[in-house]
Amino acid sequence: MSDKEDTDNGKEGESEDAVITWHHRAVSANSARAAGLNTQLARGAGAHRLSCSATRAPHNAGNQVCLPAMNPANETERSADKYVFTAGTYKLLALTIGTIGVFGFCNNIVVILLYCKYKRLRTPTNLLLVNISLSDFLVSVIGINFTFASCVKGRWIWSQNTCVWDGFSNSLFGIVSIMTLAALAYERYIRVVHARVVDFPWAWRAIAHIWLYSLAWTGAPLLGWNRYTLEIHQLGCSLDWVSKDPNDASFILFFLFACFFVPVGIMIYCYGNILYTVRMLRSLQDLQTVQIIKILRYEKKVAAMFLLMISCFLVCWTPYAVVSMMEAFGRKTMVSPTVAIIPSFFAKSSTVYNPLIYVFMSRKFRRYFLQLLCSRLFHKISWLQKNLKERPLAPAQRPIRPIVMSNSCVTRDRPKKRVTFNSSSIVFIITSDNFQQFDVTSKAGDSSQANVIQVRPL
């Protein structure tokens, strides 16, 4: 009986020891949780951590209990910090950038197809327009996809190398577009003011120089002069605008000057001279014939189309340039993610506008676009295509002989005429004598003796 009681007392003692041990462990675990919570609050971290505390019991000395110190409040805070915008805002941004990408892809591929399909659209001027469409098409295919996927996921989901590629490609295609617009302005300037014929070799050389120039500036960050990094909205990558390193800051200054202010200055100078020359010609009473008025009206329409293209591009890209300069020149606190994302998307929307301007303002593009559309929808109606193909040219598109105006026009003498080249171009030459020989195919002309107006239908 005594042995049984001793056995029961031993079991009871072991049970009490187990309860005491469990109690000590629970107290130690609670202490560990409290210590872990205090550490997380002090460091501002919301991640899971293991808090380990040594507990010593009579029968289990030196055992270590490790429990996860979890804090629901910190977990929620961590999840919220991961997203810059709300879920609804990310959906709206994904819808916006997706729409820009789809319309940019469709519009620019139509312009490229029209140029390749119809020979009458293959002119040096239109080749420069196609170069803009090509760069915008590549932005729609390459640059927008990374941003769209990041908007869907609510954060940047790509690697560092992809970030570098995203920043490089968007910068490259943007510079190609603005430099091509500057080349178009210069092309109109040398044709209208200096009457120099622009041919395909000139256009191809201009395009090659544009791409090399753009590659030089966008490739410099790959070689260590600045870098491509994630933007503040965390949905795309660009240059490191906020770096205070002298090496990086010097690149930002040269980059803005060479890739934004220089092409804008070229456009302003060229179109200022074009408008001045056309206005001077319209002021001459001896040139106010019906035919010449139509040509001048056409020239004004072409200039308006290019000015609209340039205006849309500048409206789209200037806010992004301003925000970038604010970050670069010490106004980073004024640039929030919302302030940064709107100009970025607005700049990408420029890929949609140019093809619409071509189709609605250029008679040839509009005509062949309708022909392409009709040939796809009614390919069995052959007479419709034939009717569109054999449609007579408009008066402004017919070949016109150059008209040479001299001082004898004051006495109402009949102006001298001379055919200089076979094309649908017109050259107005204002001379100081009765007749002056002028060869428009020559690269060199004496601009002090003659002011020349030359137009060519697109």
Image: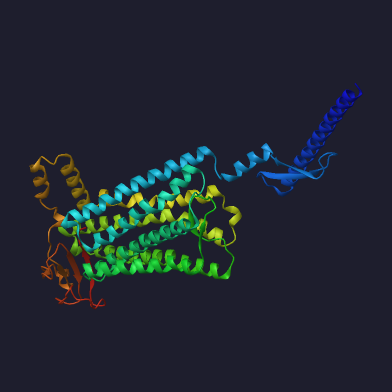
Judge left or right: residue 346 versus residue 45: left
Judge left or right: residue 422 versus residue 28: left
Indicate the position of residue 132 as horizontal and vertical percent values: 32, 58
Quarter holding the C terminus is bottom left
In the picture as drawn, the residue positioned furthest to the right comes out as: 2
Tell me if I can see residue 289 in this picture: no
Indicate the position of residue 165 as horizontal and vertical percent values: 44, 58
In the picture as drawn, the residue positioned furthest to the top comes out as: 1
Relative to 384, is 404 above or below? below
Relative to 3, is 447 above or below? below
Q: Residue at x 34, y 45 (%)?
A: 103
Write down the quadrant of residue 127 in the picture. Answer: bottom left
Q: Nearer the viewer, residue 8 or 314?
A: 8
Q: Residue at x 15, y 70 (%)?
A: 404
Quarter holding the N terminus is top right
Q: Residue at x 11, y 49 (%)?
A: 389
Relative to 104, is 161 above or below? below
Q: Nearer the viewer, residue 51 or 325?
A: 51
Q: How is the image coloured?
A: rainbow
Indicate the position of residue 271 as horizontal and vertical percent values: 33, 63
Tell me if I can see residue 292 in this picture: yes
Write down the quadrant of residue 399 in the picture. Answer: bottom left
Judge left or right: residue 151 versus residue 456: right
Q: Residue at x 30, y 63 (%)?
A: 184
Indicate the position of residue 47 as horizontal and vertical percent values: 65, 45
